[in-house]
Amino acid sequence: MISYKAVSYTASRKQFYLLVFLLFVLLASLAGIPTWIAFRSWPYPNLDLLLFFYALIPLLWVALLVDFGSRASSIEFHEDGFSVKKIAQKTNWHLYADILTYSERLGSKQNEPSPELRVYLSDNWFLIRPSDFINYDSLRDKFTQYGQPGPVRKVLTLTERNRFRWAIGAFALIIGLNMLFAYLAHTPVDKAPAKLKSVTAIVDRISTNSTKGIFKGFTLKLHPWPDLEFIVSRRDFDTDIRSLKQLIAVNQPITVQLRESDFRKKLTQTESLSFGDKYDNYAQIRVFSIDQGKLVQLQSTNPIYESRHTNLLLRTILLSFLLLFCWVGWVFVDSYKVLRPN
């Protein structure tokens, strides 16, 4: 009697390390870093920033599922069948007779995508690519012995379908939390201009605010309020304020004008904070006038109103569109045939 020796094929470790790297970048950029930034706003975290970035995590998780979820990571052939393991899924055993069809993309022309083989079984399917297996040709020759060639099929395993549903559900939940935050933080604005209050303090530091090289204004750190940031925005002034950093003297007194409500709520703390005051950039206070004697005198000529914190109409339209996007995604996933275990 001749024994059959099992033959194993394992995907390149590059695939595994790439997935780990992408997950690390995903968690760091969309969870870790925003959480750290949001909770720097002592004593109240900036929930508006946090919920925005948290909403992106399920979207990128779906993208990772689409690209990595169906790819085989290891295959082992035996005499009467084979086992296949997909990334982040358990190993499944199949008979060769379970192979129904396969779909092959040759990718022989220069501008075509790389070759790949999709193998469809009665209760599973998987994807094989040359970038994952250096023995791609051997695997291709083995699997194309069974089943029949056919078109690409819209199928998912039960595990894959459930993972997509969890990701879409998480996205919808965070959108709902964003909408709830918008309504809780919103403050109706009086049409009358806001009262302003002059405050004199010592300049500890001045730093430039810019996003992707676009100048936004400056941040002043004033003594005795080291945990607060006094924002000088270019949008509040008609004149060019780019030279302000060179004009303001550090460690010298300066007089700034800010909303009287910010003065009472955050500086003297004689008035209670609203939900929006606490969780929408608590640490930031807008400045509308700067006076440091002969060094600099700057006054905003624009009308100043109390902060609304959130734009209800704009945010409702945007979040409603994203909820519609979730519904479309759910329907699209449900349009795929589910391959259930026998």
Image: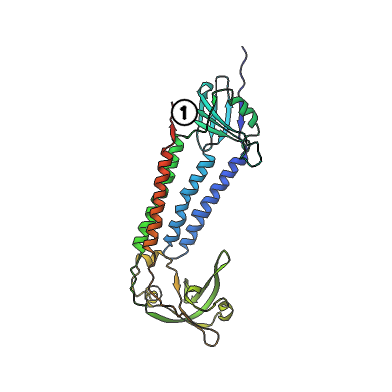
* Relative to 30, residue 122 above or below: above
Give the percent coordinates (x, y) of residue 222. 49, 76
Q: Please tell me which residue is depicted at 54% across the width and 41% down the height of the picture.
A: 67
**Quadrant that contains the C terminus:** top left
Query: On the picture, is 9 further left or further right than 318?
Result: right
Give the percent coordinates (x, y) of residue 8. 61, 28
Please identify the quarter of the rendering in which residue 335 is found.
Answer: top left
Q: Amino acid at mark 1?
A: Asp
Give the percent coordinates (x, y) of residue 37. 49, 61
Residue 169 visible, this orientation: no
Q: Please rate how many residues cluster around mark 1, counting C-alpha atoms within 10 Å: few if below 14, some from 14 to 19, many from 20.
A: some
Give the percent coordinates (x, y) of residue 43. 42, 65
In-front residue for pair 308/269: 308
Please identify the quarter of the rendering in which residue 301 is found.
Answer: bottom left
List the single residue furthest toward the bottom: 294
Residue 276 visible, this orientation: yes
In-front residue for pair 21/251: 21
List the single residue furthest toward the top: 1
- The residue carrying mark 1 is 123
Please identify the quarter of the rendering in which residue 81 is found.
Answer: top right
Color style of the picture: rainbow
**Quadrant that contains the N terminus:** top right
